[in-house]
Amino acid sequence: MTKISLPSLMPICLLFPAALVLSLASTPAAAAGLNGDAAYTEGPQVCGQCHAEALDAWLSHGHSRKLAIGGPAIGALDGRFGLFGNARDGGFLLPDHDKDVYNWDNVLFIIGASKHWKTRFVGSDGHILTKNGKNQYNWSDGSWSNYHKDETKQFSCGTCHTTGYQIDGKVFNEKGFPGVSKAGLPGIKGDWAQFNITCEACHGPGAAHAKKPTKANIKIDKKAAQCGSCHVRGKDPNVTIAAGGFIRHHEQYPEHLNSPHAKLSCGSCHDPHDTRASGIKVREGKKEVCDTCHAKQRKAYTGSTMEKASVSCQDCHMGRATKSAIKNGPYEGDVWTHLFRINKAADYTMFSDDGKKAKNALSLEFACMRCHADADKAAYAGIASTHTIGK
Ligand code: HEC
Ligand code: HEC
Ligand code: HEC
Ligand code: HEC
Ligand code: HEC
Ligand code: HEC
Ligand code: HEC
Ligand code: HEC
């Protein structure tokens, strides 16, 4: 654990004197950062002036809550750092130990503010807070886990948790605002133009478009690979990395590439501008997004024992073999898995022998036995038509 140095506890505004901004802006690197169309706006609030609906939808999505401001030290600059007030006022808990470290005056950012899976904390010198562990809050059961206990852990997560991230570069938005690392925070690796996964993470830098909107100066990319730039782990997106008997989290792209849906886009099922949970396009009562393309299976399944008991297509075909914060059982993680195929063979195992990779189909453990804990796998393997059980 790096000791928090006194100057880093100063309000961030003192760390961005106008002179510093000016001197950086006059260097060649800064000029490149500010070059015409490639500049980012100050944030989604700018886009929202003309695209109010899109802004509303975004605000309800986890993409807007990846990295939030922590304590009051940084509060004065809310407009620049995000759209939200201090996390301190947002019902977030801090670890209940080492109060010299885990106190709101010392929390610069919180990582994972959607209250979805888990939250971690960045200290005022930019490092992730790790002292004495119990430093990751798990939302589903209110427990604390050890995340890199007592290690010195840089915040190197900007690639996927911020917009316009550059690991070594200087990122400027149109106001010439330099990325946070230039505040001299030793724990922060790289720079970014905006907090969170903003409009411009998906549509590209938009300052020029916001000034003079045309279709030509803003991009729409519907390919799975675009979402896959963050929903991925490891170097090879074709490999689904596993550990401890589960697929690791943020691997929806590798799962997708190994699924029968590999040729579809993520947008076939998810609309990033839909306010339903996860932006899933169809979700009304028992009607599911699958029905649009798999009418035959819907028909077969309707009226079966499990359909009547409200078991969904997703429950079996996306069985939660992926884990982010906690596991909910021997065969249940906490993230829906995008493999869709189910291998019914009684001797099929889902992971490679070394346990480090997942194969391309769910096993019956994950598809069925997370609910039917006592089931006989061989007997389940012998069921001829799962969709019509009880019909
Ligand atoms: C001053 C109003 C204004 C602002 C600010 C603005 N837009 Fe637009 N935007 C428009 C208009 C008008 C169009 C339609 C342009 C056309 O049809 O030629 C548009 C179109 C778009 C499109 C669709 C392009 C297409 O190919 O159909 C996207 C995506 C978009 N804007 C994103 C953004 C983002 C992201 C921001 C913030 C960086 C933003 N807009 C800021 C007015 C605005
Ligand atoms: C720049 C990185 C990045 C890109 C690009 C990106 N995502 Fe995400 N996405 C994230 C992160 C990080 C989270 C976790 C948000 C949270 O804290 O809940 C997330 C969460 C989600 C969730 C979970 C729902 C929720 O409310 O949290 C869905 C669904 C999702 N993304 C779909 C998509 C789709 C579809 C695309 C492409 C159109 C996409 N993402 C592009 C980084 C990204
Ligand atoms: C996670 C990626 C992602 C984020 C974040 C995102 N968009 Fe989009 N946006 C898309 C995709 C993909 C489409 C194309 C949807 C389609 O037609 O299938 C789109 C379409 C649009 C369109 C075209 C009209 C429409 O609604 O289809 C506009 C305008 C737009 N986005 C504006 C915005 C604005 C403004 C924000 C921020 C408030 C934003 N987007 C955030 C991915 C994103
Ligand atoms: C390759 C992209 C990527 C990198 C790098 C990355 N993350 Fe994430 N992270 C994601 C995505 C995507 C999600 C949400 C989807 C999921 O977890 O399956 C997520 C989710 C999270 C969540 C849970 C958010 C919530 O709302 O519950 C936390 C906390 C988190 N990441 C912390 C970190 C930290 C800390 C680092 C750096 C040490 C990091 N991440 C690096 C992509 C990434
Ligand atoms: C946009 C259309 C679309 C949607 C929505 C969709 N699928 Fe598919 N699905 C396909 C296509 C296309 C294939 C590939 C068919 C093939 O290879 O013959 C496929 C294949 C599959 C397969 C493997 C079929 C086989 O023969 O092995 C399963 C299982 C599956 N989908 C389940 C689902 C579930 C569950 C959902 C809802 C969560 C869903 N799908 C949503 C289009 C879709
Ligand atoms: C109780 C678990 C369960 C539910 C619920 C379920 N499936 Fe399946 N599904 C399976 C199993 C197991 C297979 C593999 C069939 C085989 O190999 O005999 C399968 C096979 C499939 C296939 C491959 C083609 C075929 O018909 O064999 C598709 C497509 C599919 N399901 C879609 C759906 C859709 C869409 C829904 C919801 C309407 C759904 N499933 C509900 C367990 C389920
Ligand atoms: C065939 C339909 C389909 C496709 C294609 C698809 N998803 Fe999903 N996805 C779903 C469904 C259904 C859920 C469950 C949402 C829920 O219950 O909230 C989901 C959930 C998610 C979640 C949240 C996981 C959780 O446990 O809440 C993320 C993140 C996500 N998808 C990202 C992606 C990305 C990225 C892609 C493309 C690489 C993609 N999805 C492609 C249907 C799909
Ligand atoms: C989300 C939880 C869930 C999943 C996943 C699930 N089931 Fe079920 N299953 C149920 C419920 C609920 C019922 C109806 C209540 C009951 O009889 O226990 C049921 C009933 C059954 C029955 C009727 C006979 C009995 O045991 O009462 C069979 C057989 C069955 N499931 C097999 C399967 C198979 C095979 C799979 C995987 C392909 C599967 N189930 C996946 C929850 C689930």
Image (cartoon, grey):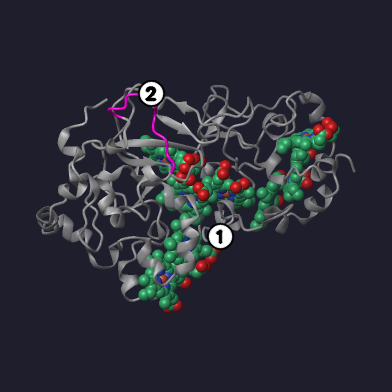
Identified at 52% across, 61% down, the residue is: 273
Q: Of marks 1 and 2, which one's residue comes earlier in the chain?
A: 2
Query: Where is mark 1, residue-wise?
Result: 274
**Residue shown at 77% from the left, 56% from the top:** 295
Magenta stretch, residue numbers:
91-101
Q: Residue furthest front?
A: 89
Query: Percent from the top left, x then y, of residue 290?
Result: 69, 53
Q: Is residue 272 above or below residue 353?
A: below
Query: What kind of residue is marked 2?
Result: Gly
Q: Quadrant of the N terminus?
A: top left
Identify the element where label 1 is drawn. loop
- Identify the secondary structure beneath mark 2: loop
Where residue 31 sits, quadrant-wise, is bottom left
The crowd level at tag 1 (other Cα within 10 Å; few <14, some 14-19, many 20+) is some
Quarter of the image where one finds residue 377: top right
What x and y, as percent, mark residue 59? Answer: 46, 57
Horizontal side, residue 292 vs residue 165: left or right: right
Q: Which residue is mark 2?
A: 133
Indicate which quadrant contains ligand 4: top left
Amino acid residing under circle 1: Asp
Question: Residue 311: which disc?
Answer: none
State left or right for residue 85 relative to residue 366.
Answer: left
